Amino acid sequence: MSSASVLSRALPAALLALAAPPALAQSVWFVDASATPGGDGHSWATAFGQLQTALDVGLEGDQIWVAAGVYHPTKEHVPGDPLSVMFYLSERVSLFGGFRGTESNLDERDPTLFESTVLSGDIGVPADPSDNAKHVVKMGSLSTPATVLPELGGFRITGGNAPGRGGGLVIGLDGQGYSPALTVSDVLFDHNAADQGGAIATLDFGLLFLRRCRVENNTAHTDGAAVFARTGSLHAANCTFTDNAAGGRGGALWATSISSGMIDYANCLFARNTAGSSGGAVHLSGSNFFSGVGTWRNCTFADNQAGTTGGAFHLNTNSTIEARADLFNSIVWGNDAPRSPQIHGPGQVVEFCDVEGGYPGVGNIDADPLFTGPSGAGYEPGPGSPVNDAGDNGAIAADQVDLDGDGVMNEPTPIDLNGTPRRVGEPLAPDTGAGTAPLVDMGAFEQRVFQRAQ
């Protein structure tokens, strides 16, 4: 079966599954690291102690509920190679973390326990990455077309160390079969490493949806410290990519694609990422066969740094098929590189954006966004910022990852990166954008409405 036929058959099914209401689990399996050995996994009282045990018995449509604790992969996928252990998602089984171990409903999870439910590749000497698992989580070829889009939600994924791609998570075809597809929600990826794709690699027609994720402090020896996307699809909303470091290209993303619409981001923050050569935040690579095409709507790029070109973006426009970035309602400010500190590569589609130094395009401005915000954040434009009410309502991303949980994916994204409403409108700001008031702000954050003292 050709790769093209795999994509054409599996991708529409995955998208339809995402658009449909979540299917009820056929079975729920319970996992608790503190469980008494010998449980059958059918309740918290008889929970499995190992996550791998639940993965071995889970069937399509099942859910695995995981109590807070630390879980290490134990199943070798290359006989005789102890570093080949990983949590392998072979079929459409959903994993949910953040449980105390008493809940009877998925909605009862405690979000404060998400990052305490740890999938860790640190299987050897603690804090010595040389003997860590190569991948923490992997999803490969599916045996049948996707009818249920599985979800991985409420975890911390850390400690993967891949000599190839995808230390934290790798998704893509790894043999004959159908393209894998996965939604990842409310997951922290941190301190993973790889040659390419320190935290995440989506390869060979893998389809990945990220929502409300944090990808931070990951490293790549060469390309894509946060994400490496080679002919795979990545759709991210309300995510942050911060403090990732690539030795070569793309501090937060290195990507190629075979068509537009495969790489897109909405309401995302890219800050303090670094690349040794090009693309402090993003490197899109064209070639003789593939383009690098991506779309960013209402995103913020700040304090990213590249060693040569493109402090925020490097677009390869010197190839047979040129790379292209489409930016709408975004902020590109305070990035640094010896050449082209903001955007390297002419001819990009940039509209209703605030770009330091300016960039040609309808509605673009070159004005200090007046960042403010809580300590450690610092990328929310304050009152009176020129980016407030300066975006294009018609360019707001569709809510394709269903951020508000209403089952409607074709509506404009209803909330910002803080989870507060989009298109609020600042009472004292002029409407300089496009559309019917209230107008959307540029960047990942919507200005919080003034509350005058009474």
Image (tube, grey):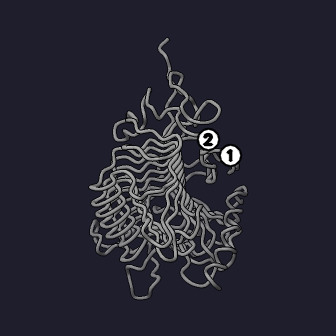
In the displayed structure, 144 sits above or below 372; it is: below
Seen from the viewer's position, the closer of residues 8 and 120 is 8
Residue at the image position 56 percent from the left and 58 percent from the top: 235
Q: Residue 73 location, x and y as percent?
A: 44, 72
In the displayed structure, 128 sits above or below 240; it is: below
Say whether residue 421 is visible: no
Seen from the viewer's position, the closer of residues 94 and 407 is 407
Give the CA distance from mark 2 to mark 1. Answer: 8 Å
Q: Amino acid at mark 2?
A: Pro
The answer to whether marks 2 and 1 mark residues whose Cβ atoms lie closer than 8 Å is: yes
Seen from the viewer's position, the closer of residues 305 and 148 is 305
Q: Residue furthest top?
A: 454
What secondary structure is found at the residue carrying circle 1? loop
What secondary structure is found at the residue carrying circle 2? loop
Say whether residue 129 is visible: yes
Horizontal arrangement in the rendering, residue 275 relative to residue 103 (left or right): left
Residue 260, quarter of picture: bottom right
Residue 165, quarter of picture: bottom left
Q: Residue 70 location, x and y as percent?
A: 42, 62
Q: Residue furthest bottom?
A: 80
Q: Residue 122 location, x and y as percent?
A: 35, 68
The residue under label 2 is: 414
Quadrant where the image shows the N terminus = bottom right
Q: Amino acid at mark 1?
A: Glu
What is the number of the mark on residue 411? 1
Horizontal arrangement in the rendering, residue 14 relative to residue 214 (left or right): right
Mark 1 nearby-residue class (10 Å; few <14, some 14–19, many ≥20): few
